[in-house]
Amino acid sequence: MLSFRAKIAFYLEDVTTAIGLTVNLLILALILLSLGIYVAQTYPLSATWQMWLRQLDWGILSLFSLEYLGSSGIVMQIINLK
């Protein structure tokens, strides 16, 4: 039986299973959405749109940061120190 971390690593690297393909397509969609937000912010927008785009961009950044911290083992090292 694979550990939780090993399962996550498997699905991030695998595109032959439905779950692996979905995860990779979701990551790709988030990257493209983040790129679209960056481009949209170069245009003059109302304050409301700027706020929504900034919040969405920070949300995407937070997801990628959590994924990085989880995959690098930093969180597990911090938890084991306590």
Image (spheres, rainbow, N blue to C red):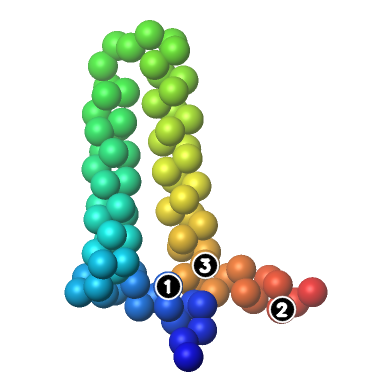
The amino acid type of the residue labelled 3 equals Gly
Residue 46 falls left or right of residue 39: right
Callout 2 secondary element: helix
- What is the CA distance from the residue labelled 3 to the residue labelled 2? 14 Å
Residue 5: x and y in percent read 49, 77
Residue 73: x and y in percent read 54, 74
The amino acid type of the residue labelled 2 equals Asn
Residue 10: x and y in percent read 35, 78
Question: In front of the other: label 1 or label 3?
Answer: 1
As drawn, the residue found furthest toward the top would be 46
Callout 3 secondary element: helix
Q: From the viewer's side, name the closer residue of 81 and 14.
A: 14
Pointer 1 or 3: first along the chain: 1
- What is the CA distance from the residue labelled 1 to the residue labelled 3? 10 Å
The residue that appears at 49% across and 72% down in the rendered structure is 72
Callout 1 secondary element: helix
The amino acid type of the residue labelled 1 equals Ile
The residue that appears at 48% across and 91% down in the rendered structure is 1
Residue under circle 3?
70
Quadrant, the C terminus: bottom right
Q: Is residue 10 above or below residue 65?
A: below
Neighbours of disc 1 within 10 Å: few (<14), some (14-19), many (20+): some
- What is the CA distance from the residue labelled 1 to the residue labelled 2? 20 Å
Pointer 3 or 2: first along the chain: 3
Q: From the viewer's side, name the closer residue of 18 and 34.
A: 18
Residue under circle 2?
80
Q: Report the disc number at residue 8.
A: 1
The residue that appears at 25% across and 55% down in the rendered structure is 25
Q: Which quarter of the picture shows residue 36?
A: top left
Question: In front of the other: label 1 or label 2?
Answer: 1
